[in-house]
Image (cartoon, helix red, strand yellow):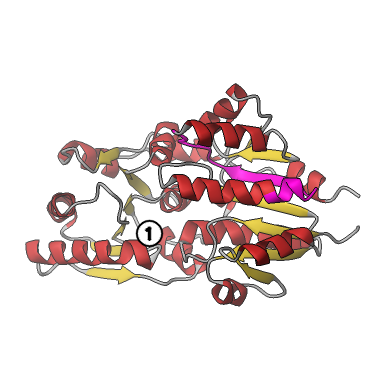
Amino acid sequence: MVKKRFVLSGYFGFKNFGDEAILSVIVKKLKEYGHKVTVLSSDPPYTKGKFKYIRCVNMFKIPDVLGAISRTDFVISGGGSLLQDTTSLKSLLYYLFVIFLGLISGKKVIIFAQGIGPINTPVGKFLTAALLKRCTYVSVRDFKSFELLKKWGVNSELLCDPIFSSTVPDCEKTNTLAVQLRDCKNMSEDFIDRLAQAVVKRFANVDVDIYSFQDAIDLEVCQKFEKALKLLNSDIKTKIYSSLTDEETINNLARAKYMIAMRFHALIVGLISGVRVLGINYDIKVEKLSNEFGFPLIGLNKDFGNPEMNLLENQDLDEIKAKLTLKNFNWASFEKVINQE
């Protein structure tokens, strides 16, 4: 087999659990075949420190990005939700620019298990559709993304998020509630207080483990939530986890009995670990996941309380387990594309 060179583009180096876990999955798969990997990262020393035998380039140094792409065979964009403009149009244009560089350089471009959208700007819709039509292989992680691309005339393969195929430890559940929070434009002191009140009311005798998945965005909110809990009940047992490795995050979450989480990949880890989960609906991808698996949701700007907590505590894990049998990540098409002679 001819060894090939790959440039990986994504939300890498920002120390966010979900994106870093996806990067690990892709690198591991490419290294199985002995291919050479270069990662576009916001923090090249951090990313390089996670892996052996990869090259890293600063994603914001365009001459270096151009150099890496000029020497590669493939550009892989993904996974996660890169192609959306709710975070910012600037972010969408950056990831499209990397795809564009790959295409005009004559490289094979792969869109890897992405969630597409929301894309609200006309220019964002036009450029995304135009560029993805020219990619070698496009895969998406949810049905709505698949339908959106179909509407735009883009052929894609519907897969699941690769984190669904993560290995989780077979461990006993502890009397623990895992809470994973992040900052966002609708996060407020009022919501933190209301969530703390609901947790103290229903989980006063349960250890509360609070998870920061990306310290720059999550940690301050997690600290505020812990403080709010302690003000309501000084005896409640809490612990904040931050700066964990991917493996430590998965292993710790797998031991929890219950989970209240905002981030998409926290909820996936909870689902595959047999944890009863409740989602905080800050983004459409969380709502999509809730609709698919039937776990309860609470809104940042809506009242919640006993009904949602009842649904959390009485969740049917067997029903979720049955749905998870359909969520094994299928590498067949990806492997066929990258290993063609």
Q: Residue at x 53, y 32 (%)?
A: 125
Please state the horizontal and vertical placement of residue 130, each as a whole percent of the image. Answer: 65, 33
The extreme top residue here reads: 151
Q: Is residue 222 above or below residue 50?
A: above
Asked if residue 205 lies in the magenta stretch, the reply is no
The answer to whether residue 80 shows anywhere in this view is no
Q: How many numbered callouts?
A: 1
Is 104 colored magenta in this rendering? yes
Q: Which of 36 and 299 is in front in this view?
A: 36
Q: Quadrant of the N terminus?
A: bottom right
Who is closer to the viewer here, 340 or 292?
340
* Image coordinates for residue 155, horizontal then vertical, percent: 69, 29
- Say which residue appears at 49% left-offset and 50% top-offset: 91
Residue at which label 1 appears: 173
Left or right: residue 149 versus residue 88 is right
Q: Which amino acid does label 1 sit on?
A: Lys
